[in-house]
Image (cartoon, rainbow, N blue to C red):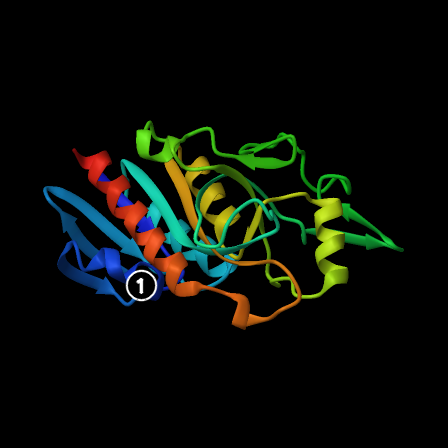
């Protein structure tokens, strides 16, 4: 078995890396580790869907993995999710891809630019139908994600997104990761830990340390289960 772990920044998964054996570094963005007898490659593409799509495409064009995991922190729109909760993002949307039509917004599917069932889309959504079988994953709440270039921080923009593209969390990489894995038929999961609510921007209300602690504990338990 070989595992690809994708994180926008090393900071987000540093505690996990301390529990694996470092092997070598091919380049700044790709590091090789071992967990017991299993090879774990760490790809750090950087923040954002453009970087994630490019570096995953480049890597998956020459390497094959048994499964891939995307890990990071995220903000949530869902008040029932507590700060520090770890979730399994099973569905992704791209709420910024489209065009304004007066006060309305037309998605790329409504514009006819992409068929909503053009693989790997299903009814205009990216749905993870290649989830690895895992009791640890099954324990996590399944949520819907929006992948954005601009993290929302005003009431007006937040309410507009919630009305047009209802979701539980937002990130800046999730859809690019899922699109890449589905396109290459790689079993995958996106694991996110909630660091904040999506609201008027106030970082004093965030709890990144708790989110990172919980994220890395779940990741360790998950990888330990998958390689056993």
Residue 113 x, y percent position in the rendering: 71, 42
Which is nearer the eye, 218 or 129?
218
Q: Secondary structure at mark 1?
A: loop
Which is nearer the eye, 105 or 194?
194
Q: Residue furthest right?
A: 102
Q: Horizontal placement of 116 versus 55: left or right?
A: right
Q: On screen, 148 above or below 78?
A: below
Residue 134 x, y percent position in the rendering: 32, 30
At label 1, counting other C-alpha atoms closer than 10 Å, the crowd grade (few under 14, some 14-19, many 20 or more) is some
Residue occupying image coordinates x 33% and y 57%: 213
Q: Quadrant of residue 12?
A: bottom left
Image quadrant holding the C terminus, namely: top left
Q: Which residue is mark 1?
A: 29
Give the mark count: 1
Residue occupying image coordinates x 77% and y 53%: 99
Residue 188 x, y percent position in the rendering: 38, 38
């Amino acid at each position: 078995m070989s595992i690809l772990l994708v994180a926008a920044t090393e900071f987000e998964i540093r505690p996990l890396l301390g529990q694996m054996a470092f092997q070598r570094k091919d380049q700044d963005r790709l590091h090789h580790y071992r967990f017991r007898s299993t090879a774990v490659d760490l790809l750090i593409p950087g923040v954002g869907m453009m970087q994630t799509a490019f570096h995953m495409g480049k890597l998956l064009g020459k390497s094959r993995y048994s499964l891939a995991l995307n890990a990071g922190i995220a903000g949530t729109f869902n008040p029932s999710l507590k700060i520090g909760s770890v979730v399994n993002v099973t569905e992704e949307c791209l709420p910024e891809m489209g065009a304004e039509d007066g006060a309305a917004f037309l998605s790329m599917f409504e514009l006819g630019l992409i068929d909503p069932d053009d693989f790997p889309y299903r009814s205009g959504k990216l749905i993870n139908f290649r989830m690895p079988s895992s009791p640890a994953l099954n324990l996590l709440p399944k949520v819907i994600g929006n992948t954005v270039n601009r993290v929302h921080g005003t009431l007006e923009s937040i309410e507009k997104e919630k009305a047009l593209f209802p979701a539980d969390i937002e990130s800046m990489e999730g859809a690019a990761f899922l699109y890449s894995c589905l396109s290459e038929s790689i079993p995958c999961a996106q694991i996110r830990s909630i660091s904040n609510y999506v609201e008027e921007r106030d970082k004093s209300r965030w709890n990144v340390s708790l989110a990172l602690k919980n994220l890395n504990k779940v990741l360790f338990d998950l990888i330990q289960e998958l390689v056993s």
